Amino acid sequence: MREYLLTLCITAAVTYLLTGPVRKFAIVAGAMPEIRARDVHREPTPRLGGIAMFFGLCAGLLVADHLTNLSQVFDKSNEPRALLSGAALIWLIGVLDDKFEIDALIKLGGQMIAAGVMVMQGLTILWLPIPTVGNVALTQWQGTLLTVALVVITINAVNFVDGLDGLAAGMVCIASAAFFLYAYRVWVSYGIEAAAPATLFSAILMGMCLGFLPHNMHPARIFMGDSGSMLIGLVLAAGAISITGQVDPDALKLFAGSEKAAVHQTVPVYIPLLLPLTIIAIPAADLVLAIVRRTWRGQSPFAADRGHLHHRLLEIGHSHSRAVLIMYFWSALIAFGALAYSVNSASMWIVLSVVFLSAIGLLLLLLPRFTPRAPMWAQAIVPPRYRRRRAVAESAPVAEPAAAAVESEEEEERTPVAVGVSGVNGATALGVRSRFLDRRKAGTSR
C-alpha cells in the first residue's frame, strides 16, 4: 500500500507542477478557442491540460517500475507497456484536436486504433463470467471487438461529461478510487496477481485527476481538453478490461461445486466491473441521452449542443459549483454502492443506505435555490455565502454593501471577450484570473 500511495503522490505532484507551465504554453500556442454557444464559461480559457496529465502518467509508471514490489507488475505483465502505447496515441490525437479541431470521425478512428494497439500487446478481454452459463472463453476476434467497443464507449462517455469546471476530473477520480479499493481487495485478499496491473492503473489515474483538479476547479484556469478527457477515459477502461477479462473467477475459490455455481456466487463481485459504464454511469447515461436526443432531431450524434445533464442542472437554477457537487454525489453513490454490494451482497443495510442516499440526491435536485446555512458556532469558519445574514452584516464594514452593489452592477454590464482582442489574453491568462473581463482594462468598446 505504501508503494501505491507513493506512486499516487508522485503522479499528482508531477501533474500539478506541470499544469502551470502547460497553461502558459497553451496561451502561446493559441490553444484558446473562442467561446461557443454550448460553453458555460465566460472568457477564453486555455486547453491542453492533458499534456500535464500524460507526463504525470509517465512519471507514475516510471516510479512504479523502480519500486520493489510494483516492479514485479512490469516483469510479469506487458499491460503497463500496452497502456502507455495506447495512451500516447490517444494523447497525440487529443492535442491535435485541442489545437486544430479535427473531425469527429477522425477522432473516432484514432480511438479505435489506440484500443487496437493495446489489444495487440495483450491488454484484452479473454473471458467473461456469465450468470447461469459459466466462464465463457472468447475467441480472438470476439475479445478484440469487445475490448475496442469498451474503450471507445468509455472514452466518449468521459469526453461528453467534460462540460463544467472540475466535473470530468472529479468524477473519474471518484470512479478510480472505488476501482482501486476493489482491485486491491482482489489482489491482496485472494492473492490474485493478475489484478495488480489494474490496481496500479487506478492509483495512477487518481494521481492524475487529483493533480489537475486544483487548476480546474471553478473558476478554471485551464481545461484538460480532449487530450485529457480521452486520456483518462482510456486509462479507466484499461483498468476495467484488465481485471474483468483476465482474472479467472475460479481463482477466487468462493464456491464448492460446478463452474456455474462459481460464476453465480461471484456475480456481485464482477458485475460492477464487467463494464466500466457501471462505475461511470452518470456520463454513460449522458452519452446515451445525447445520442438519442440528437438523432431524434435529425442531427449527427457527434453534433454539440447544450442538452447535457450538467447544462440541465444549470438551467433549473443550480449554481456552477452546486451542479458539479451534485454530479460528484451521484457518481460516488453509484461507484461505492456497487463496491459495497460486491463485498456483501446479502446485506439489506447496503440496499437501504443506497435508497436513502438516492432520496437525498433527488431532494437536492429539486431544491436548486436552497442555500444551506451553517449554525452560529461555525460562522467564523465557513465561506461567507453559507453564513447567516445577521452574522455577515455584523462582521462586514459599513461600506461593503455599497461597494458590492456597485461591483454587481459593473459585472452585469460586462460581456465575454473573444480570443484575439488586444491586451486581453496575456493579462487574463498570466495574471490574476477574474471571472469577467473589465472593458476599461481590455481597451475595447464592446
Image (cartoon, helix red, strand yellow):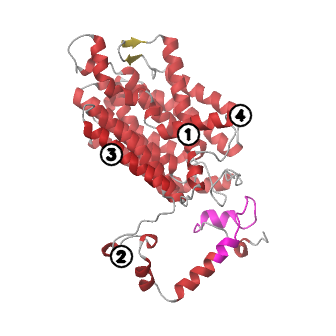
Choose between 297 and 266: the one closer to the eye.
Answer: 297
Looking at numbered disc 1 in the image, what kind of residue is underneath it? Asp
Magenta span contains residue 423: yes
Nearer mark to the viewer, of 3 and 4:
4
| First-in-chain label (1 vs 4) | 1
Looking at numbered disc 3 in the image, what kind of residue is underneath it? Leu
CA–CA distance in space, label 3 to label 4: 45 Å
Choose between 190 and 58: the one closer to the eye.
Answer: 190
Disc 2 element: loop
CA–CA distance in space, label 2 to label 3: 36 Å
Q: Residues within 10 Å of mark 3 (few under 14, many from 20)?
A: some
Looking at numbered disc 2 in the image, what kind of residue is underneath it? Ala
Where does the image place residue 325, in percent across and percent down from the top left? 46, 54
Looking at numbered disc 4 in the image, what kind of residue is underneath it? Ser
Who's the residue at 65% across and 61% down the image?
A: 42
Q: In the image as oriented, which residue stretches furthest toward the left?
A: 256
Q: Which mark is residue 286?
A: 1
| First-in-chain label (3 vs 4) | 3
Left/right placement of residue 166 relative to residue 248 reads: right
Read off the residue under disc 4: 300
Q: Which residues are magenta?
A: 409-433
| First-in-chain label (4 vs 2) | 4
Where does the image place residue 427, in percent across and percent down from the top left? 65, 67
Read off the residue under disc 2: 380
Nearer mark to the viewer, of 2 and 3:
2
Disc 3 element: helix
Read off the residue under disc 3: 6
| First-in-chain label (2 vs 3) | 3
